[in-house]
Amino acid sequence: MEKVILAYSGGLDTSCCVRWLKERYGYDVICFSAFIGEVSDKALLRKRAYAAGASKIYIMDLKKEFAKDFVLPALWAHARYEGKYPLATSLGRPLIAKHLVDVAHREKAVCVSHGCTGKGNDQVRIELGVRAMDPSLKIVAPLREWEFKSREEEVDYAQQNRIPISVTKKSVYSIDKNIWGVAIEAGILEDPWQAVPEDAYLFTRGAERKKGSKTIEVSFVRGVPVAIDGRAYPLVALIEKLNAIAGSFGVGRIDMIENRVVGIKSREVYEAPAAEVLLTAHEELEALIFDRDFLHFKKMLSDKYADLVYYGHWFTPLREALDQFFARHQDRVTGTVRFRFSAGQAIVTGRKSPNSVYSETLATYSAKDSFDRTAAQGFMKLWGLPYEGCFKGKKS
Ligand code: ARG
């Protein structure tokens, strides 16, 4: 029997996919589940996959790989899609694609499959990834093909086929969550005028009642965030810790209208407390360390990078080359940034680095000033030379 590897979450959709892939295509279905957020109950996941008809399941904790190979490059790139979204989901998909292909090779499968809808960005990221790595693999996306038109029809199908469905009430929202952030969509959020109900939030729930403030320091060594308040953490733990601290103050909530790859606009709500803090901190340090031209040029590349991650172009020569650009001077990005968190805000209150090129004696207006003002006069003369008289007689 030919084998298919299915990216399996354990939810209703992908559980129905297992049975459907067997029935419709006659495949031997092998499930693959990756953890890049909180680790769910493995025994339950296994039980469900088998009950749905899978012959085998791979369960992998990929948080470390996700942090090192996907989050860190995106942090160095200062990647925020449309200037806002730190790309948590977008970064997770190529990792899943990579492992789908690995498992497919290991199992000598002919096909891979996923539970993404035909309207979203995630299908693009997974399928472009798979095709970049192995174009000979077939790809089946049951949700684009099958006959079910509603959740109720899926539930009927699951019941008829004795596929266990979750007893916990399904969220009214579509949620995707990993250590770099949560994406919340659908339900009443589809109306862009509706405020986000407090209970929609996961990382920052209850933050609106938070009082007071808290000061923390985040330290980086060679571009990598390594410590909070002087205490060292491995990358994943540091990100999780920041999600908890900053999240409790409601830091990192984003509510935006976003342009999807498939052409539609959608209203998206995100929570990315750690991403917000780390991106801001890294930007602050670079501002202290690098020159104007470098920083301004990098900004253009940051936007380009965010676009290509969002568009599913992770496995491309351009993404690799841009990563090298962003990595080039990270060995200088060592230092500490201080924040004050209070209701919904993370304010930077200080930054320092041994590699800072900020000069207090050049910047100061006090007696310590070492800036040569006499040189400014000649500079004015030449800087304005090309434009001398060019607005003469014109009303501005
Ligand atoms: N709009 C975001 C993106 O394209 C989030 C997608 C979230 N996916 C989900 N299944 N809820 O990256």
Image (cartoon, grey):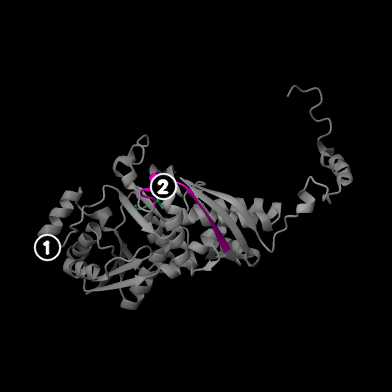
Q: Nearer the viewer, residue 158 or 339?
A: 339
In the rendered structure, the answer to whether residue 341 lies left or right of residue 244 reads right
Residue 294: x %, y % from top left: 68, 55
Residue 348 position within the rendered picture, expressed as x and y whole percent measured from the top left: 58, 50
List the residue tagged with mark 2.
Answer: 210
Residue on which the image places disc 1 = 162
Instruction: Identify the residue at horizontal 27%, vertical 70% (top origin).
Output: 42
The part of the chain drawn in magenta is 204-219
Q: Quadrant of residue 140?
A: bottom left
Q: How many marks?
A: 2
Which residue reaches farthest left? 160
Indicate yes or no: mark 1 CB to ligand 1 under 8 Å: no
Crowding near pointer 2: few (<14 within 10 Å), some, many (20+)?
Answer: few
Q: Position of residue 151 (x, y in %)?
A: 20, 50
Q: Nearer the viewer, mark 1 or mark 2?
A: 2
- What is the CA distance from the residue labelled 1 to the residue labelled 2? 45 Å
| Mark 2 residue CB less than 8 A from any atom of ligand 1 | no
Q: Residues within 10 Å of mark 1 (few under 14, many from 20)?
A: few
Determine the secondary structure under disc 2: loop
Secondary structure under tag 1 reads loop
Q: Amino acid at mark 1?
A: Arg
Residue 315 makes an appearance in the image:
no
Q: Is residue 334 left or right of residue 204?
A: right
**Residue beneath the point at 20% across and 60% down:** 16
Magenta span includes 381 = no
| Quarter of the image with the C terminus in it | top right
Quadrant in the picture for the N terminus: bottom left
